[in-house]
């Protein structure tokens, strides 16, 4: 009888923990290895079981576009710019263009809760003429 009770207990435990055993784990995609279909699906929220890893040390060619009624940015093709990731972070997209950010895969925050920073536009005189500057500073917001 003890063996039957123990078997029943084990079966109940196994059945009760089935959701834990059957739970799917998020798949991690590396930023540098994405194809266009994955990028589109991710940003549309169609891959909400995927996490985008932005690894420290990654360099990405950067294309900058500035358009509007008053300003436009024209960059020289022979002088490429690169975006360098200085600290690993993770991004998930729960629904179309609703991105959440994390550094530990545990705590997820929206852009404005995760980042802090500033944008600065300047004009300076140099010996070769006037130069315009655009500066973006982006830091992780400290928890209070």
Image (cartoon, rainbow, N blue to C red):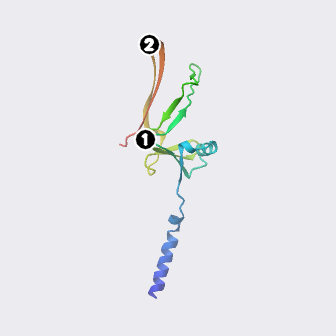
Which residue in the rendered view is the most extreme toward the bottom?
1
Q: Give the alpha-carbon distance from disc 2 to disc 1, as whole Å.
A: 34 Å
Which one is in front, 95 or 101? 101
Q: In this figure, which residue is indicated by the disc labeled 1? A: 87
Residue ID at (44%, 52%): 106
Which one is in front, 15 or 87? 87
Q: Secondary structure at mark 2?
A: strand
Relative to 50, residue 63 above or below: above
Relative to 133, residue 26 above or below: below
Q: Secondary structure at mark 1?
A: loop
Residue ID at (45%, 43%): 88
Residue 39 position, x and y percent, is: 60, 43
Asked if one can make out residue 4 in the rendered structure from this viewpoint, the answer is yes
Residue ID at (53%, 54%): 26
**Drawn side of residue 64 relative to residue 57, left or right:** right
Relative to 119, residue 109 above or below: below
Q: Quadrant of residue 96?
A: top right
Which one is in front, 3 or 112? 3
Residue 143 position, x and y percent, is: 37, 43
Q: In this figure, which residue is indicated by the disc labeled 2? A: 125
Residue ID at (46%, 83%): 5
Which residue in the rendered view is the most extreme toward the right?
37
Quadrant of the rendering where the C terminus is positioned = top left
**Drawn side of residue 117 relative to residue 48, left or right:** left
Residue 34 position, x and y percent, is: 58, 44
Asked if one can make out residue 98 in the rendered structure from this viewpoint, the answer is no
Q: Quadrant of residue 125?
A: top left
């Amino acid at each position: 009888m003890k063996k039957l009770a123990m078997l029943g207990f084990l079966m109940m435990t196994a059945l009760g923990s089935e959701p834990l055993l059957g739970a799917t784990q998020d798949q991690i995609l590396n930023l540098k290895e994405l194809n266009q279909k994955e990028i589109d699906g991710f940003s549309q929220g169609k891959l909400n079981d995927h996490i985008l890893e932005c690894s420290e040390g990654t360099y990405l060619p950067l294309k900058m576009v500035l358009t509007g009624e008053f300003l436009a940015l024209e960059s020289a093709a022979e002088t490429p710019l690169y975006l360098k990731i200085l600290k690993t972070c993770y991004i998930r997209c729960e629904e179309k263009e609703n991105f959440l950010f994390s550094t530990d895969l545990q705590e997820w925050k929206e852009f404005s809760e995760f980042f802090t920073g500033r944008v600065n536009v300047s004009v300076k005189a140099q010996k070769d003429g006037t130069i315009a500057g655009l500066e973006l500073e982006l830091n992780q917001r400290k928890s209070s």
